[in-house]
Image (cartoon, rainbow, N blue to C red):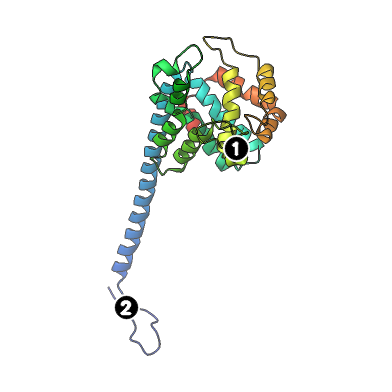
Amino acid sequence: MAAVPSSGFAGQEPRCFDEGAAAQMERFIEDFGRMYRERNEALREVTRAHHEALLHLSMAAEFRDGDTSVHIISIGYLAEALALHLGSTPAFARMLRCAAPMHDIGKIGTPDHVLKKAGPLTQPERAVMNEHPEMGAKILSSSRIPVFLLAAEVALTHHERFDGTGYPKGLSGEAIPLSGRITAVVDFYDALTMDRVYRPAFAPEKALEMLMEMRGTAFDPAVVDAFAANFSELACLRQRIMEERPTFSDLIDAE
């Protein structure tokens, strides 16, 4: 097959490119593009499998503390909705939906005699209990995938208090990441509206009242105010979750 001359530069011999070589290059580019797409799809599947495994580990931690999978799934959806009401981007809110359910994953390492104790904890037992945020962050931060890094941030900071009296670092105000401040509010509300072995569930309105009482001490006033301003919507969302019982796959895949 005849070679096709190039235009070349002034004073230089024209360069020639074989059409067969050009076709081979096109095939190489197509193959590379397909490999890149397949690589990305494989990475998404690995990330998804990793995510589901961590959610199951989170559920195991919650079961040890008397909670259920619907509690951690509810926290995810409520955190997403509240983040949007606070003006967060949809991308951040979706990531928080997937990250917030892993907030107490560190409880998997808390001894039963502390985690399941019926009465008040002694000072040494409280110190052991207060280690679970850092345990959770250590489990989650071993990955460089953004959703797990956000989950590590949530695990580490959702027990901090707005007035600086929380743990493990004693952070206060906006030094506490927004992800932790949002998760703290929805976790508190959701836990109050669940039946416990030691008490029945509080009515949604009573749980909101108790949340408002801790505005500015335990919880960020702006986050509490956004929750209160959108209470009807958030309460209806939680009720729908209780009725429909979405799965971990639903949580991860929801748009």
| Mark 2 and mark 1: Cα distance apart in space | 69 Å
Q: Which residue is mark 1?
A: 172
Q: Residue at position x 56%, y 12% from top? A: 195
Q: Residue at position x 44%, y 18% from top? A: 115
Residue 18: quarter of image: bottom left
222 vs 249, nearest the viewer: 222
25 vs 90, nearest the viewer: 90
Residue 192: quarter of image: top right
Residue 4's place in the image compared with 50, above or below, is below
Disc 2 vs disc 1: which is toward the camera?
1
Q: Which residue is mark 2?
A: 16
Q: The C terminus is located in which quarter? A: top right
The disc, 2 or 1, on the residue closer to the chain's N-terminal end is: 2
17 vs 81, nearest the viewer: 81
Q: Is residue 167 visible?
A: yes
Q: x and y percent of residue 218 in the render? A: 62, 29
Callout 1 environment at 10 Å: few (<14), some (14 to 19), or many (20+)?
Answer: some
Q: x and y percent of residue 57 in the render? A: 40, 26
Q: Residue at position x 48%, y 21% from top? A: 123
Q: x and y percent of residue 132 in the render? A: 44, 28
Identify the disc placed on residue 227.
none
Residue 19: quarter of image: bottom left
Q: Which amino acid does the dot numbered 1 rest on? A: Ser
